[in-house]
Amino acid sequence: MRNSRLTVQVRIEAESRFCIRHGSVRAADARHAGLRPGPESATVKLVTSEDIAPYLPAEEAGADGDYLVWFRSPSTALVEAVLQRLGADRGQVYRYWYGGFGAHLSERQLDLVRRVPGVLEVWQDTEGRPAPLARVPPAERVDGSYIISVADGVSPRAVAERTGVVPTGVYERTIHGFSANLTDAQLDLVRRDPDVLTVEDDAYSNGLRVAGLED
């Protein structure tokens, strides 16, 4: 089970984590991520660091060269800065989500991305490239309940319907997606839907279920 520093990050700032998906990176976001804003608000420069982000191999069948890169501070603007630092192009990126991206990287690029200070950790992706599943510690989970984020412009209800899932909540503000109780088979099906960006455990926060706080 991938249960590391990311489990803390998954639940941080539930009210704001999706608010910067479409805009330029703010100075505060850039500083938190270890990046330095340039003269334009949408420009960031990478700051060198000796720290190396943890690498987590796939728990199932790993996909050679496919990696999921998680940021400390979510922002789509950071993706461009990181790709530029890696000398990578958009053709290598096969998935974007609020907290990072999935890309096919060389061994050199993998080493470089782990040294970017804005990167929290890097996972080896699994075969088939399913949507990332972010876990929280077992004691905090609502067993069998998940929060699913879907691509912009896609109806969360439509995704739930075509995967045979009955939503327990549909969200349009803090996230774009839905929550649902899923069997293992349904979880696998939802993760392989092309419009699903991420799946994460529902969790208890101060005695309340996070899924009930999203909107």
Image (tube, rainbow, N blue to C red):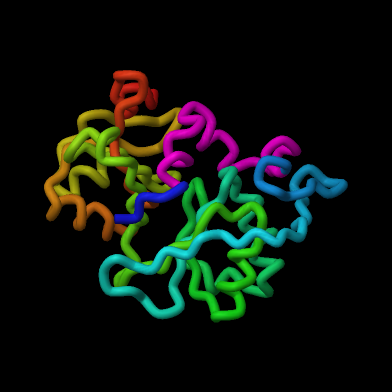
Q: Between 117 and 28, which is closer to the camera in this rendering? A: 117
Which quadrant holds the N terminus? bottom left
Question: Which residue is situated farthest in the right direction here?
Answer: 39
Magenta-tinted stretch = 6-30
Per the image, is 20 magenta? yes
Q: How many marks?
A: 0
In the displayed structure, 4 sits above or below 85; it is above
Q: Residue at x 45, y 28 (%)?
A: 173
Q: Residue at x 60, y 50 (%)?
A: 76
| Left or right for 142, reference 26 | left
Q: Is residue 125 magenta?
A: no
**Residue 112 on image: x %, y %:** 64, 70
Please state, as top left, top right, bottom left or bottom right, where the C terminus lies in the image. Answer: top left
| Residue 142: percent from left, percent from top | 22, 33
Compared to 94, does 24 lie above or below?
above
Q: Is residue 79 visible?
A: yes
* Left or right: residue 60 compared with residue 43: left
Residue closest to the eye, 182 or 24: 182
197 in relation to 148, above or below: below
Q: Residue at x 46, y 68 (%)?
A: 67
Q: Position of residue 8 (x, y in %)?
A: 45, 39
Quadrant position of residue 24: top right
Image quadrant in which you'd find residue 168: top left
Residue 129 lies, with reference to residue 64, above or below; the image says above
Residue 6 is situated, as x and y percent measured from the top left of the image, at 45, 47
Is any part of residue 195 visible from this angle? no
Residue at image position (30%, 27%) is: 204
Majority SS type along the magenta span: loop
